[in-house]
Amino acid sequence: MKLPSDCSWRWTVSSVTGPSHGAAGTPCEDVGGIAFPSAAEGIVLLALSDGAGSAAAAKEGAEIVVESWFRHLAGILSRAPDPCTAVRRLGLEDLLPLLTSIRSRTETRAERSGRTSADYSATLLGAVLTPDASFFAQVGDGCWVVESDGVLGCPTWPARGEFAAETIFANSRTAATHLQCGPGPARCTAVAGFTDGIERMALRLAAQIPEPGFFGPLFHLLKQDPTHAGEEIRAFLDSPGIRVLSEDDKSLLVVVRDETVAG
Amino acid sequence: MNEQIPYSGALSSIQLASNPEPRCACALVLDVSGSMEGEPLEELQRGVQTLLRELSADPLASRRVELAVVTFGSTVKLASDFVSPDRVQLPPLSAHGGTPMGEAVVLAASALNARRRQYQEEGIQYFRPWMFLLTDGEPTDRDTPHWKEAVKIVHEGEDRRQLLFFAVAVNEADQSQLNRLCPPQRPSLKLKGLHFRELFVWLTRSLKMVSESSPGQKMSLPPTSGWNEIAL
């Protein structure tokens, strides 16, 4: 397979504080980001984490999760003779040390601050994109949505317990048994990751499929107007019509393949 | 917040997925035994009306909370099955007879279970259900299988995190009996005088909080000091 060496990505991460958090003076407890590992050209790492509403140090927990994802994946890629091949071969066993590291980092932090590990509870949404492969991972709720060949799909799905508003966290003892991970489409043209505050408007929950009417305009915007896309997405997420639908923090990470670059 | 200018930016063509709201079922179990006659019953009914009005006015709670009412006195009956707060039509209550509390809890639990099955069949997400008991007396069915079953339902439901049970004692209610029914971690509360309105305002706030809750959120309910005789 031909490997386009000049594949590049346009991206934006937007977070807004939920109305209930805003009223209580709680900051947005979602953390998201994107990283380009220096050792691997054309590869992009994505991560998003939703700190549990109840956890005292939720934001710190989410920061630990996101940073750990970047650090762990960058490590794997830097050790691989061919990083793109390494991404194609990624699997569950590669991520188990990541969960162990997240747990031990939160335990250490908790001990130092006189808190418990549960105070740092946060979900994990992680992804790696290369020009010709993709890999997605998730612990807890939120979701990944991928566009490839004009078709939308969900490589992961929000995990929850019997009751609404209960989920699994990346630093919990049982995180490994709840880890969803696996390869996505070879050639992703667009990817979105989002926290649970957005699930109900972006996914058809009963059919377990993404809502095309939600992602179509979103991906189109970033392809057409990357400079203002972030600002627009934030304005949209903070608009009265959306705020009334969910009291929660909302974060949306969007990445599109830059079609103007030969790839 | 609805008065603000609607969004009309570059993403105005977005279509949102249409999913049913997650529901929070709450069964009110109300004592209408003979001793509630007069002012207590009037205050209780006014309190329930406050609850319905306040929940109906809240944009999220009105879509998510569903209430049923079980009354117990000369008979035990499901006076109103689960509907959204604006659709509850509670018939005027009258106070007669004894205090078959155990039987009332069993009936409320069975209504909650039926509702839960319905949510499951329809693929609707739901919050942990609530049962909220108000009484001014002591159970008159303590020597029947109903009472034993009621205690088992509450204790097991709480242990398995399948139910949230609250009991409120009015006037001279026997709290020691009531506390045998209550989960050990949440003994009964005593209503200050006939402050039903304050009690139902608290319940409204609590149900609103549940309907807004985020993942893994622990229940930290508003203070009960407005209506509870002994502050917790």
Image: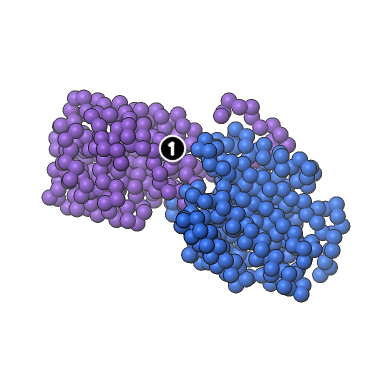
Pointer 1 residue: B208
Question: What residue type is disc 1 on?
Answer: Lys
Q: Position of residue A186 (x, y in %)?
A: 73, 64
In the orientation shown, which residue stands out farthest toward the right? A262
Chain B tint in image: purple
Asked whether the viewer can see residue B170, the reply is: yes
> Which quadrant is the C terminus of chain A positioned in?
bottom right
Chain A tint in image: blue
Q: Position of residue B192 (x, y in %)?
A: 25, 32
Helix or strand or loop: what does disc 1 sit on?
A: helix
- Between A94 and B106, the one lying in front of the other is A94
Q: Position of residue B118 (x, y in %)?
A: 41, 48
- Between B220 and A259, the one lying in front of the other is B220
- State how the image is colored: by chain
Query: Crowdedness of circle 1 by 10 Å Cα count: few (<14), some, many (20+)?
Result: many
Q: Chain of mark 1?
A: B
Q: Residue at x 68, y 48 (%)?
A: A13
Examine the image and state in which quarter residue B169 appears: top left
